[in-house]
Image (cartoon, rainbow, N blue to C red):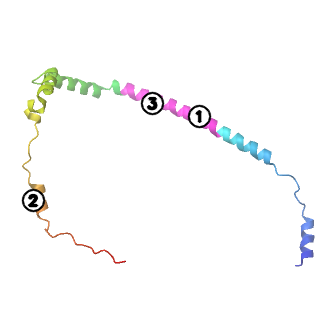
Amino acid sequence: MSDHEHDEDNALLPGDDSPPRNNVILIAGIASLLCLVALKFVFDSYHEGQRDITLAENLDSSVTSELLAEYREDVQNRLTSSDIPIDQAVARLAEQGRRGFPQVLPFQSVDEGARLGWSRHSPEPAPVIPEPEH
């Protein structure tokens, strides 16, 4: 095909001489951005409201739970039925520290498992890797 034939084919097609629609594109972009920002606040508000409702329901059900009531009663019974009242135990702990309670004193372990496990390793030193020469 020659250049002359190619020009004739293009002449048959109508050209688009309209100016670019930059204003329409800009307005559509700004409108889309504003819609997205507005929707973010709408969705955040909705989810916060749903979270608050769910938390309130969970709190109501947990406070009135029979299992929780039984647990609180058990803890209160153990605190008041011990050998020493809790206020005296706190005062004794403040004065004497852990030494005032032999039940919780730290003691040296008699378990030799860890020491024996390490002694089974060979006493050979780690191999030395020579540095490469430059």
Tell me, for residue 54, which label it has, or none: 3
The Cα atoms of the two marked residues, 3 and 1, are separated by 20 Å
- Tell which of 47 and 120 is nearer to you: 120
Identified at 92% across, 66% down, the residue is 12
Select label 3 or label 1 by which is in front: 1
- Identified by mark 1, the residue type is Phe
Q: Secondary structure at mark 2?
A: helix
Viewed as shown, does residue 89 lie left or right of 72?
left
Q: Quadrant of residue 125?
A: bottom left
Q: Quadrant of residue 91?
A: top left
- Tell which of 87 and 61 is nearer to you: 87
- Identified by mark 2, the residue type is Leu
Label 1 crowd (10 A; few <14 / some 14-19 / many >=20): few
Query: Within the magenta stretch, is there residue 38?
Result: yes
- Identified by mark 3, the residue type is Thr
Q: Mark 3 and mark 2 in contact (Cβ < 8 Å)?
A: no
The Cα atoms of the two marked residues, 2 and 1, are separated by 64 Å
Compared to residue 93, the image places residue 122 above or below, namely: below
Q: Position of residue 64 (x, y in %)?
A: 34, 23
Q: Position of residue 32 (x, y in %)?
A: 69, 42
Secondary structure mostly seen in magenta is: helix
Label 2 crowd (10 A; few <14 / some 14-19 / many >=20): few
Tell me, for residue 116, which label it has, or none: 2
Viewed as shown, does residue 102 lie left or right of 44?
left
Viewed as shown, does residue 131 lie left or right of 56?
left
Q: Which residues are magenta?
A: 36-61
Label 3 crowd (10 A; few <14 / some 14-19 / many >=20): few
Q: Position of residue 40 (x, y in %)?
A: 59, 37
Identified at 37% across, 27% down, the residue is 61
Compared to residue 18, the image places residue 53 above or below, namely: above
Per the image, the residue denoted by label 1 is 41
Q: Secondary structure at mark 3?
A: helix
